[in-house]
Image: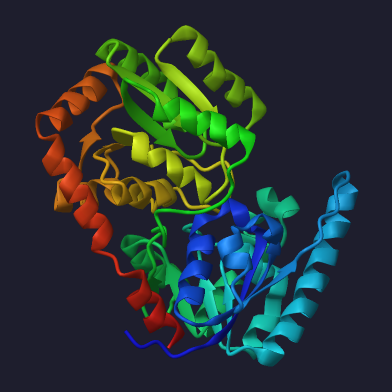
Amino acid sequence: MKINKKRITVVHAQSVIDYPPVISLIDNLLNNGNVVRLISYDTNKLPDTLRKNKNFYEISIPKVDGNLVGKVINSYRRSAFVKEAVKQSMKNSDILWTTTDLSVRVLGDLVLKYKHVMQLMELIRWYPDNFYVRKIAKFGLFRYPIDKYARKAWKVVIPEENRAYIQQVWWNLKNKPYILPNKPYRLNPKGGKNQAFIEAINKIKHEERKVILYLGILSPERGLDKFAKSVHELGNDYCLYIIGKASDSSYLSKVKNLTKIYNNVVYLGHFSAPTHLYFLKYSYIGLLPYQPSKPSVEFISELNALYCAPNKIFEYAGYALPMIGTNVPGIEYPFRNYHMGITLKEITTKEIVSAVHTIEKDYDTFSKNSKTFFESVNLDKIVDEIVN
């Protein structure tokens, strides 16, 4: 495929290392000969394969820690820094690509001066003027005109098809947004092999039991305690491995406590993207326990979990893992179309044990179909259509 070379400024006003889809996007753009200038936090933590690319330039947003007042002041400094960095970068760029709603708010009207690709990671109907007034903004006050910037953007990009239709209706967009799934661009990352990683990978690599893996954010709505109990019921031939960052310290303690209650539950810790992918090749089944719930952040829609667009579904599929997920459209649709996993009506021991046994009866077919799903998405073609 011939792709015209573009010069693209990517703005991600958060830690880039916490967003695998952004890393994937940068890798995609660079691999197809584009010049990428990234403005973000923690750019020094990106894989060397990206940082050493001759067409990659990084501008790291400085961090300032402090109390609440300091954080408010820092948010204004961040905005000023990012705006100036964008002005300088766009002197030699064709496209401005923002990756999140926050990135748009930081830049404001500046995005209107350029050919703007507006990417959204979550399904949102409105956005607060700043994070500190979000509880008030839910009643209609202090709302940021995020929809205005979407209507005036050159392209809008969403990770899941149902979300695209919903966002189009909510924001009165002229065209349906482009669908860019949260699929990893590479399955065999390099680098990131520190001591903690080496110890963790050796543990899972030499595991003799069948590894049922949960990879992602650790939060109460994931129901990991129920999966732990269910895997225990399956017997000594199975184990549950948990990898990810906890939503808060108290829940992390609860996850670690599961390893004390059940001898076949292992918590390996948190590993930044893309090194978390290494663990998938040693796994047997992947878990996608998404449950519809009221989001803790007011401006993220209740529909977000229903029409989820998890990185994990593609990460598991890339390594041909059959999956067990919950009964929400974002998971049920691909499972039904590709026959690559089992959805649970409820997260109960009976349902989970039954799902594992169903997969095992035809494991090779589930595994093959999972890989087929992964290969059905051509990221190069999708990104080419967006930037050209």
Colour mapping used in the image: rainbow
Work out whether 203 lies above or below 82.
Answer: above
Q: Is residue 265 visible?
A: yes
Which of 163 and 83 lies nearest the eye of the viewer?
83
Q: Whole-percent x and y of residue 353?
A: 23, 20
Residue occupying the point 49% across, 89% down: 5
- Residue at the spot x=63%, y=31% of the render? 248
Q: Camera-side residue: 62 or 365?
A: 365
Q: Where is residue 334 in the image (x, y as percent from the top left)?
A: 23, 52
Compared with 124, 290 (above or below) is above
In the rendered view of the protein, which quadrant contains the N terminus?
Answer: bottom left
Apparent side of residue 297 relative to residue 106 in the rendered image (left or right): left
- State left or right for residue 220 relative to residue 380: right
**The C terminus is located in which quarter?**
bottom left
Q: In this view, does 32 lie above or below 41?
A: below
Front residue of 142/60: it is 60
Residue 271 image offset from top left, x and y in percent: 56, 40
Task: Write the residue at 58% across / 90% down.
Answer: 94
Location of residue 99 by image quarter: bottom right
Name the residue nearer the viewer: 333 or 144.
Answer: 333
How many marks can you see?
Answer: 0
Find residue 341 and report its horizontal and vertical position in percent: 21, 40
Q: Can residue 142 be seen in this view?
A: no
Relative height, residue 48 to residue 339 (above, below): below
Q: Is residue 380 left or right of residue 145?
A: left
Q: Residue at x 78, y 69 (%)?
A: 79
